[in-house]
Amino acid sequence: MSTDNFLITKRDGTTETFSLEKIKGAILKAFSSVAEPVDSVALQHVVDHLRFCNGMSVEDIQNQVEVALMADRHFKAAKAFMIYRKRHEDDRETADKLRFLIDYCNAANPATGSKFDANANVENKNIATLIGELPKQGFIRLNRRLLCDRIKEMYGKETADRYIYLLKNHFIYKNDETSLANYCASITMYPWLLNGTRSVGGNSTAPGNLKSFCGGFVNMVFIVSSMLSGACATPEFLMYMSYFLEKEYGRDYYENPDRVVDLSSRNRTLDKVVTDCFEQIVYSINQPTGARNFQSVFWNISYYDRYYFESIFGDFRFPDGSQPQWPAVDWLQRRFMTWFNQERTKTVLTFPVETMALLTEDGDVKDKAYGDLTAEMYASGHSFFTYMSDNADSLASCCRLRNEIQDNGFSYTLGAGGVSTGF
């Protein structure tokens, strides 16, 4: 067969005229690199194994060369040829990363510069975000291999190959291929209340007062979020904060929030102490972090009406045996909502993402006071989700419509509790 008019397809998709002499030259270099002599007859015998067609790829030709060398028992030359290909493949990947690095630095913004993850929630373009972008191509390949192996195991090779075809040709989209971490999780904070952050790899002891609660909570959320690619929901946040306020200022702390409780020169009222705690936690969590490629963590919290709260936490006990007080949690929820809504008029505060859980009865909100509160907060410009259910067997957080909390078999949990679920 004449190959005079054949074209071959290069790795970058371009074509060039087929050249048998180039192929022979590459084979001779493989023999020369291992000091193995080869005459024209042996060379032609290797070439006779090869089959060419118009438009075939460089990889197809090189694969045939490897097989031909092995078939003629030129093992040293075959090994040298394989190593040569691998080195050039590594060089091409390095060159690709270098081009990506230069393009990223020259891009107008991080989204256009992010070749493999243009949907990444990245505002800033700096060395931290660049370091986070560099390995994403490798993560995509690894995630696809893991999923393909699983599909092949469950449904066969044909289905796995079909999945890759649909993915590469953009018929379907697979979210979050650029990370190996679990997506989102709703966690219980009880293990942290007992043992600090040691159960999740930290070295902090359990919080013992309001200040250590605020600082330790931020650390705990950052640690957990570093092991997630999505959100970390803490549905017990305000209930636990109320517990430490009670320990420090009495179980009736909420009844007189205007009394002065700070004996320093600042003479802060209890309300000011509370809002200072809100400020410390919210502003700290909204800061970018190296463990998240210079993004802040994605943090969710929940509010509850009285009936929802009592249904979920009615039998709850803190480590000292005390129970959460609904009037105190009610006051703290209302105060946080009001403070957060006002604080957002001063600066952009993305997190926490809030969800109001309302129990319904006969198609209407059972707790009328919280139905009114929800309407009032929406009317005042606040932005939060509202989840309404006739049974408090589930919670909702952010984009997850419903998290079942009765079936522990589904739970992705960091400890015992009724609010730990995987998203």
Image (cartoon, rainbow, N blue to C red):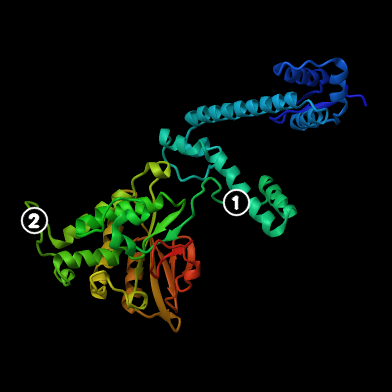
Decide if residue 116 is in sight here: no
What residue did someone put label 1 on? Answer: 174
Residue drawn at point x = 6 percent, y = 51 percent? 265
Q: Position of residue 329 (x, y in %)?
A: 26, 70
Q: Nearer the viewer, mark 1 or mark 2?
A: 1
Examine the image and state in which quarter residue 38 appears. Answer: top right
- Above or below — where is 9 with respect to 42? below
Residue drawn at point x = 27 percent, y = 65 percent? 240
Q: Position of residue 296 (x, y in %)?
A: 38, 47
| Number of disc labels | 2
What residue did someone put label 2 on? Answer: 267
Decide if residue 153 is in sight here: yes
Badge 1 density bin: few <14, some 14–19, many ≥20, Cα 10 Å: few
Residue type at mark 1: give it. Lys
- Above or below — where is 79 with respect to 167? above
Residue drawn at point x = 74 percent, y = 31 percent? 59
- CA–CA distance between discs 1 and 2? 55 Å
Left-right relation of 373 to 55: left
